[in-house]
Amino acid sequence: MSIALEATGLTKTYGAVRALDDFSIAIPAGGVFGVLGPNGAGKSTLFRIALGLVRPTSGTARLFGAPAGDVAALRRVGAMIETPRYPPYLTARDTLRMLALESGFQNPDIAAWLERVSLTHAADRATSGFSVGMKQRLGLAAAFLTRPELVILDEPTSGMDPAGIQEIRALIVDLARHEGVTVILASHQLDEVKRVCDRVAILSHGRVVAEGGVAELTAGEARLRLTLASPLAPVLAVLADRGQADGPDAVLADIPRAEAPAVIRALVEAGAEIVEARWREVDLEGVYLKSLGQTPTAAAPEGAA
């Protein structure tokens, strides 16, 4: 399996702040990989190190097997880190032309990329009058302009309205699935990540706390909801730290599906009157919150146990 971005034992400190803490990850080439985490988790720092914009305190980062910052590797990469800034007096068209010249890319299809990010109407307007969302669109066009193999995007839909988010989401999926571009994106939009990403990593305090396929991560987080016609206390006592109240007459049990029959028998033997037992799936938001040590909210019931 080809690895697009790899970090090994990566640490980056800014004074007393440890942005990355012995961070390791291997992101495969192909598809869309999401990097999630609260502000300060280390997402942007990882990207900046991988692109050679800052040096790590210790550890290594590699792009396609080459050290971070390697010129040949960077020619295979496009990126948009935070809200892009361009010379305000240049038009959108001239901005892309300038970036193509700087990268040495011949014959860029500037008009096509302006169309793909819905900026054709503003192609000859100075970027000084662009909204945040328009600047994001121009940044996306710039990131994809040179036909890179890998594109790194930091909050690509920041400042966009729901229609714009849906449009850019479709563009990212199309590029990954039909044009073979590997996309690594950081986003606070969990619904966006769920819709476009094949795999995700959740970061907290500069470390990976969860990683895997979106379906894989959510499938393992189902909880058993028990509706009771008897007091909750005996049930919670049996479940101990694997149970919590869910309203006045129900309990949520964090147990594997295979253990459900035995647990239900034990609860009945302890005097519980169980009216209904039903599995409830936890969505990506629930996995995210649980990984950060917060209490997730279960999604709608899936089916009876």
Image: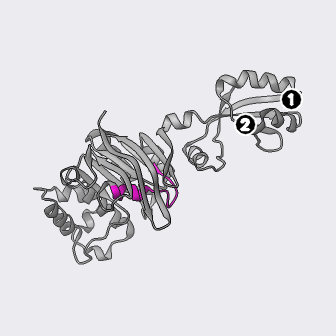
Q: Residues within 10 Å of mark 1 (few under 14, many from 20)?
A: some
Q: Position of residue 92 (x, y in %)?
A: 23, 68
For label 2, the SS is helix
Whole-percent x and y of residue 58? Answer: 38, 54
Quarter residue 114 falls in: bottom left
What numbered label is drawn on residue 80?
Answer: none
Look at mark 2 in the image and give the residue it sits on.
242
Residue type at the position of mark 1: Ala
Residue under numbered circle 1 = 272
Picture quadrant where residue 282 is located: top right
Q: Which residue is pictured at 45% across the width and 57% down the height?
A: 42
Q: Indicate yes or no whether the magenta region holds residue 17.
A: no
Question: In the drawing, does residue 191 fall left or right of residue 86?
Answer: right
The x and y percentages for residue 163 are 42, 56
The tag earlier along the polypeptide, 2 or 1, is 2
Q: Which residues are magenta?
A: 35-49
